[in-house]
Image (tube, rainbow, N blue to C red):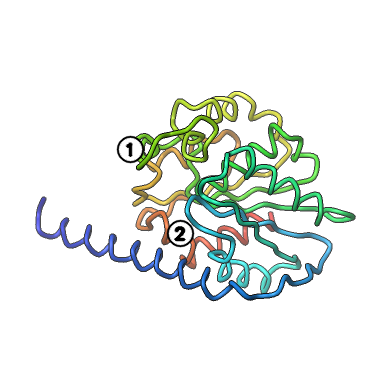
Amino acid sequence: MPPAAARNLFRQLGREVRAVARQGQLIAAARNRATPSIPGERVVVFVHGFMAAGPVFDPMRAFVEQRAPVGTVDITYGPLERFDRAVDRLASIVDRVAEGRRVDIVGHSLGGIVARWYLQERGGAAHVDRLVTLASPHAGTRAARVAMGPLVAGSLLEAIRPDSRVIRTLRDGRARASRVIHTAVVAGLDRMVTPPESAASIEDATIHWLHDVGHNEMLFEPRAFAHVHDGLTR
């Protein structure tokens, strides 16, 4: 590898490491926070990715709340939960917050796939107007094949293999959520969603590429914040 390319790679990996560390700090800081009320006629539900938790969205949620007339809430599911259980958690919170108001969803990585399954296969499209996905493996990710540990049937990682039942069903059943306005933001330097083009493999979505951003950086990138805001106010 040429020296300049090696330096760029190490800089990018350093940014990803810092983004992961920041996620850990946000999760730790939120352990004792109270559950806030959710004001507004519209609420945005944020769904995190694998090995994360709801508080990783705190900076993005603050940005959205300051600029759009919405309330926000996040969900948390565990890394060892079954895929369908994570979908259950999303369905439960949408049922709770949707009374008398409309709902939008923002999902990072695996969270975008959880959201799409809820919309297409669980009837969630009847309650949700907009979906924004950030670095979500809509065509699966090869990284799931080499993840540590067995890919147990029904697990979160098994769901995002390129040839999984979940990925095939979502691809074939896209029409069931066609009324939901979908914005997909792609991390061009993604090493978790491989190839990165998988995050753009979604019909009828508005696609935004951030060519110089990595998978975890996406959660703290101002341009991603702007795309989320725009996707929620289209």
Taking depth in this image into account, of 158 and 199 the one nearest to the observer is 158
Q: Residue at x 65, y 48 (%)?
A: 131
Label 1 and label 2: CA atoms lie apart by 23 Å
Q: Earlier in the sequence, mark 1 or mark 2?
A: 1
Q: Residue at x 62, y 45 (%)?
A: 86
Q: Which residue is mark 1?
A: 146
Q: Residue at x 35, y 57 (%)?
A: 212
Going by the image, does 194 lie left or right of 91?
Answer: left
Mark 1 neighbour class, 10 Å CA radius: few under 14, some 14 to 19, many 20 or more:
few
**Is 20 situated above or below 192?**
below
Mark 2 neighbour class, 10 Å CA radius: few under 14, some 14 to 19, many 20 or more:
many
Q: Residue at x 60, y 42 (%)?
A: 114
Q: Secondary structure at mark 2?
A: helix
- Where residue 169 appears, as percent x and y from the top left, is 59, 26
Marks 1,2: beta carbons within 8 A: no
Report the number of discs.
2
- Where residue 194 appears, as percent x and y from the top left, is 36, 40
- Where residue 21 appears, as percent x and y from the top left, is 40, 68
Taking depth in this image into account, of 104 and 111 the one nearest to the observer is 111
Quadrant location, the C terminus? bottom right
Q: Which residue is mark 2?
A: 218
